[in-house]
Image (cartoon, rainbow, N blue to C red):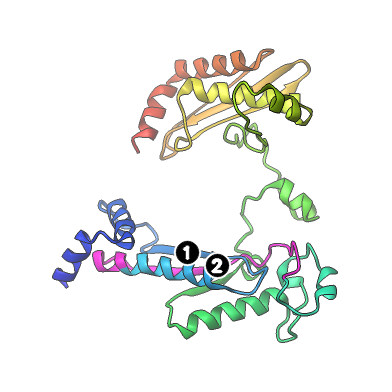
């Protein structure tokens, strides 16, 4: 076993490279839950195919590589997002017209065109499980619908806009105030890119601009830039319209959540407002928090 482990620790194949990253993560202590959890995702809006099989196969390769290097137990969950809506009718199933009547319904409420299961989602879940079982995969199957019915999602955070599109806003128990739960800068904004200095393209897309959103994002991005933050640091900013001004809320936290700073300013010019809030948090000690987060 020692020879096998030594060989695994030196192997250069990509599953071993990925596994070594996990081994390094748990060098000091094993995960609190007592095992390393591997997960694959499946959207059962169509019949399982080789891509679905490949995701489980690749994840299993990394899992097995990890097990040769570490004594920490592992689990593999294959998670089916069967609460997702049916966006279009697959071309390789029967009852095309009938299924069109079920468009946008959750997959576990869409009729099964094959008539073998309670829903199209249940049929596709069963097909996938049969496929994986035939090849002897060691996995646990999880269904979003079953998790929801069992109450496992009672404390989940979801995008309010997505629930509204699904007509399920009445199921929301609490809408989180962005002043209290400050999102990352620019969240929810749609950006269009074009070449710098290309006046014709800029003119073509100009009618799509939303000035209020552009001002808010400019303030949030100025705050981010002034602090030198990026995608890997716990930093948030959100701008609200206040007449002709903006109210900008921001926060910075330690990587482990042990400390955080909050601030709020009001101003008319977006970039200046963002920089002013950043300076306010720097005066409170944000630089040290960000330095610690970057090194975590």
> In the drawing, does residue 139 fall left or right of residue 295?
right
Mark 2 and mark 1: Cα distance apart in space: 7 Å
Determine the residue positioned at 71% across, 69% down: 107
The magenta segment is 65-90
Please say if 175 is above or below 66. above
The residue lying toward the viewer, choosing from 125 and 140, is 125
Q: Which residue is disc 1 drawn over?
A: 39
Determine the residue positioned at 75% across, 64% down: 88
Determine the residue positioned at 81% across, 55% down: 167
The answer to whether any part of residue 34 appears in the image is yes
Q: Is residue 127 magenta?
A: no
Q: Secondary structure at mark 1?
A: strand
Please say if 139 is above or below 19. below
Q: Is residue 81 magenta?
A: yes
Q: Quadrant of residue 277?
A: top right
The answer to whether any part of residue 209 appears in the image is no
The answer to whether mark 2 and mark 1 are in CB contact below 8 A is: yes
Q: Which residue is disc 2 drawn over?
A: 79
Q: Position of residue 112 (x, y in %)?
A: 74, 79
The residue lying toward the viewer, choosing from 199 and 187, is 199
> In the drawing, does residue 105 fall left or right of residue 150?
right
């Amino acid at each position: 076993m020692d020879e096998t482990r030594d060989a695994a620790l030196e192997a250069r194949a990509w599953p071993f490279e990925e596994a070594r990253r996990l081994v390094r993560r748990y060098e000091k202590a094993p995960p609190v839950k007592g095992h390393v959890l591997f997960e694959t995702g499946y959207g059962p809006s169509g019949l399982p195919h080789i891509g679905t099989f490949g995701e489980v196969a690749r994840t299993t390769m990394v899992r097995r590589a990890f097990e040769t290097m570490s004594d920490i137990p592992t689990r593999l969950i294959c998670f089916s997002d069967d609460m997702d809506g049916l966006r279009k009718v697959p071309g390789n199933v029967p009852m095309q017209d009938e299924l069109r009547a079920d468009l946008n319904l959750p997959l576990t409420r869409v009729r099964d065109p094959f008539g073998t299961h309670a829903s199209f989602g249940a049929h596709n879940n069963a097909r996938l499980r049969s496929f994986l079982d035939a090849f002897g995969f060691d996995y646990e199957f999880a269904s979003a619908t079953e998790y929801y019915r069992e109450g496992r999602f009672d404390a989940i955070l979801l995008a309010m806009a997505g629930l509204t599109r699904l007509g399920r806003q009445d199921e929301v128990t609490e809408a989180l105030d962005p002043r209290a739960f400050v999102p990352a800068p620019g969240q929810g904004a749609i950006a269009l890119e074009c070449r710098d200095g290309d006046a014709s393209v800029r003119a073509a897309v100009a009618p799509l601009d939303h000035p209020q959103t552009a001002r808010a994002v400019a303030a949030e991005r100025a705050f981010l830039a002034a602090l030198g933050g990026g995608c890997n640091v716990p930093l948030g900013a959100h701008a609200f319209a206040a007449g002709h001004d903006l109210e900008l809320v921001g926060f910075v936290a330690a990587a482990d959540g042990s400390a955080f700073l909050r601030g709020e300013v009001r101003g008319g010019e977006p970039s200046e407002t963002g920089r002013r809030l950043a300076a306010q948090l720097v005066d409170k000690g944000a630089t040290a928090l960000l330095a610690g987060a970057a090194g975590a």
